[in-house]
Each structure stands twice: as structure tokens, then as C-alpha cells.
Image (cartoon, grey):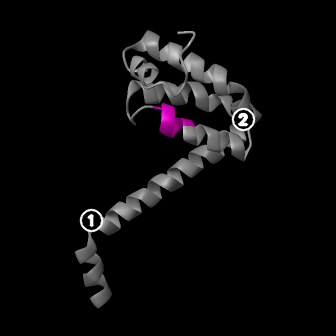
């Protein structure tokens, strides 16, 4: 795997094949981005957010779980808390938007009252 890049879709596919492949995949991610994440700060939190989208796998999968177990602790504790708070706020905003789109009749009824 010496010539594998992190953007390689084949490598991402390999990470979905089993525990040993996921470990190897996460080793490469940690090696590539570990120092930047350990530095902490807003830039490190943005980097982790981008990595979640591009390399974290689908939510609820073993890869996603192991991704967070492995990379989130690299951030300093204060940055971990800020990152998780940001994720929570984003999830709430997404849920509110979905609710607004799903219940337009409820909103019209409420506005009439």
C-alpha cells in the first residue's frame, strides 16, 4: 500500500472490507493528519470536520465509529468539546430544516391562528 493516496476511492473501499483493513486505513489517516489535529485550534477542528465528510465513512458504520475513536482523541480536550458541540448544533439545524420541509401544512395552520 506504499503508493496509495488518501483520495484513492479504492483505498476507501478497502477500509470497508474488515477490521484489519480499517486499522490500516486509519493508520494512514493518523499518520497524514495526526500532527495537525494534535495542534488543536479552529483549523484542526475544521480539518477533522472535512475528514469526517471525505474519509469517515457512512454514519453508523464500523468505519465511522473507529474513525471517531481514533482521530477525535488527537484533538486537545477543549477542542474535542468544541468540535462535538458544533456537530450537535449542525445536527439540530439539519433536523429543524427537515421538519420545516416535511410539515409545511402545519406551519400554514399555525400562521392562520
Q: Residues within 10 Å of mark 1 (few under 14, many from 20)?
A: few
What secondary structure is the stretch in magenta mostly built from?
A: helix
Residue nearer the viewer, 48 or 14: 14
Extreme residue toward the right, this view: 39
Label 2, secondary structure: give it: loop
Left or right: residue 63 compared with residue 69: left
Residue 32 in view: yes
Residue nearer the viewer, 5 or 21: 5
Q: Tell me where the magenta segment starts and ends, as one range.
A: 51-56
Q: Nearer the viewer, mark 1 or mark 2?
A: 1
Residue nearer the viewer, 29 or 99: 29
Whether residue 46 is situated above or below residue 113 in the rendered picture = above
Whether residue 62 is situated above or below residue 100 in the rendered picture = above
Q: Quadrant of the C terminus?
A: bottom left
Numbered label attached to residue 76: 2
Q: Residues within 10 Å of mark 2 (few under 14, many from 20)?
A: some
Q: Which residue is mark 1?
A: 102
What residue sits 69% from the left and 33% below the top? 37
Residue nearer the viewer, 47 or 70: 47
Quadrant in the rendering for residue 45: top right
Whether residue 35 is situated above or below residue 51 in the rendered picture = above
Amino acid at each position: 500500500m506504499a503508493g496509495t493516496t488518501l483520495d484513492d476511492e479504492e483505498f476507501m473501499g478497502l477500509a470497508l472490507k474488515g477490521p484489519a483493513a480499517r486499522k490500516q486505513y486509519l493508520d494512514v489517516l493518523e499518520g497524514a493528519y495526526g500532527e495537525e489535529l494534535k495542534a488543536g485550534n479552529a483549523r484542526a477542528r475544521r480539518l477533522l470536520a472535512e475528514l469526517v465528510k471525505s474519509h469517515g465513512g457512512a454514519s453508523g458504520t464500523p468505519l465511522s465509529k473507529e474513525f471517531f475513536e481514533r482521530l477525535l482523541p488527537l484533538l486537545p480536550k477543549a477542542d474535542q468539546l468544541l468540535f462535538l458541540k458544533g456537530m450537535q448544533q449542525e445536527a439540530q439545524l439539519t433536523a429543524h430544516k427537515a421538519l420545516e420541509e416535511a410539515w409545511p401544512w402545519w406551519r400554514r395552520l399555525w400562521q392562520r391562528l
